[in-house]
Image (cartoon, rainbow, N blue to C red):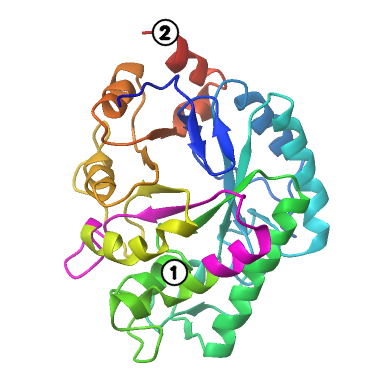
């Protein structure tokens, strides 16, 4: 069955009123302690009027895993109240909001990171430096931090969770053989490299229950030989499909290599390739800025939802333009 942007999209116990999603876009307006503020309330509430779903910007689950020195976090109970003000403001538009939970790993901000950690002692670049390889105890601690972040996410009023496993951050680092050279149960085979993600996902699922939506954002390709590909992602995520409610597909970020060309819907071929293997919704993102292009993608069943970011930064009402005008 073919759909358009205006058709609803079911995600477990939730139904989005349309298939247009506000992608997570960093605001760089958090305090030094990673608290959200008045800017976030105004920014998100203004842009929640027409989209089917808002995904909040990357939110740190650990004080040692913040992506930037001015990001926001959810690693203490004190972070809940400021985030609740954001979700309350978004909900006045009858729009659901998910939180994107992240840990930077070897790409955590040097400005605020005490100990840089990763699956292996392999540096992203000279700016970040060489991380320490996580011990099993260290992995278990981070899994617990994800669980606590999920618990706080419910208290803060979020309607679902997006697990950030893209753009070269910690979960992505474990999944890719370019950054994971471990020889223990967390490295080597696809199954082993997926173990950390599996433990994080199951910990979150146990905390939030069976009716709460959990989606995942991934980078479908590392843009480098020997890195992740859509086929490898399908192999790793297919056993987890019953615990997930959508896959949000981006690309790159795990090594300092950029795509050779960035054109309209440039990431769509990767989303379409992954979609062939799954029954849960696939969310496409990446310069899909017109209604005609978005509807063609949905009608051709190359993806099930469309996420946009940058146009909404410039124009809070851009979603109305896509949903109403031809």
Q: Earlier in the sequence, mark 2 or mark 1?
A: 1
Where's residue 80, x and y in %?
79, 53
- Given residues 258 and 284, the one toward you in this image is 284
In this rendering, the answer to whether 115 lies above or below 269 is below
Q: Identify residue for label 2.
A: 325
Q: Position of residue 213 (x, y in %)?
A: 57, 48
Q: Quarter of the image containing the C terminus?
A: top left
Label 2, secondary structure: give it: loop
Q: Which image quarter: residue 267?
A: top left
Image disc number at residue 34: none
Neighbour class for label 2 at 10 Å: few (<14), some, many (≥20)?
A: few
Q: Nearer the viewer, mark 2 or mark 1?
A: 2
Q: Quadrant of residue 98?
A: top right
Residue 138 in the image: state x and y as whole percent: 58, 85
Can residue 154 be seen here? The reply is: yes
Q: Residue at x 72, y 60 (%)?
A: 151
Which residue is depicted at the point 55% across and 65% down? 103
- Left or right, 12 with respect to 190, comes to right
- The residue pinned by badge 1 equals 127
């Amino acid at each position: 069955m073919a759909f358009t942007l205006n058709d609803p999209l079911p995600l477990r116990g939730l139904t989005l009123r349309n298939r247009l999603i506000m992608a997570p876009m960093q605001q760089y307006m958090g305090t030094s302690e990673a608290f959200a503020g008045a800017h976030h309330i105004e920014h998100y509430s203004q842009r929640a009027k027409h989209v089917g779903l808002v995904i909040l910007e990357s939110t740190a689950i650990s004080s040692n895993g913040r992506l930037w020195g001015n990001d926001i976090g959810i690693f203490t109970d004190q972070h809940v109240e400021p985030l609740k003000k954001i979700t309350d403001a978004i909900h006045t538009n009858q729009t659901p909001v998910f939180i994107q939970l992240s840990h930077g790993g070897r790409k955590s901000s040097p400005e605020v990171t005490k100990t840089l950690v990763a699956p292996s002692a392999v540096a992203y670049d000279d700016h970040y430096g060489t991380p320490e390889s996580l011990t099993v105890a260290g992995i278990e601690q981070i899994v617990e931090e994800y669980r606590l972040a999920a618990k706080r996410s419910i208290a803060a009023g979020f309607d679902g969770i997006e697990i950030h496993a893209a753009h070269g951050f910690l979960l992505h680092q474990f999944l890719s053989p370019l950054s994971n050279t471990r020889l223990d149960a967390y490295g080597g085979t696809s199954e082993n490299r997926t173990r950390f993600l599996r433990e994080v996902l199951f910990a979150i699922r146990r905390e939030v229950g069976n009716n709460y939506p959990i989606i995942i954002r991934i980078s479908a390709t590392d843009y480098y030989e020997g890195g992740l590909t859509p086929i490898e992602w399908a192999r790793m995520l297919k056993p987890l499909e019953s615990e997930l409610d959508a896959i949000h597909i981006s690309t790159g970020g795990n090594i300092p290599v950029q795509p050779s060309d960035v054109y309209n819907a440039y990431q769509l071929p990767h989303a379409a390739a992954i979609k062939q293997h799954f029954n849960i919704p696939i969310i496409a993102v990446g310069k899909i800025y017109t209604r005609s292009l978005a509807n063609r993608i949905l009608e051709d069943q190359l993806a099930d939802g469309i996420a946009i970011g940058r146009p909404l930064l410039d124009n809070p009402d851009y979603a109305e333009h896509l949903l109403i005008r031809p």
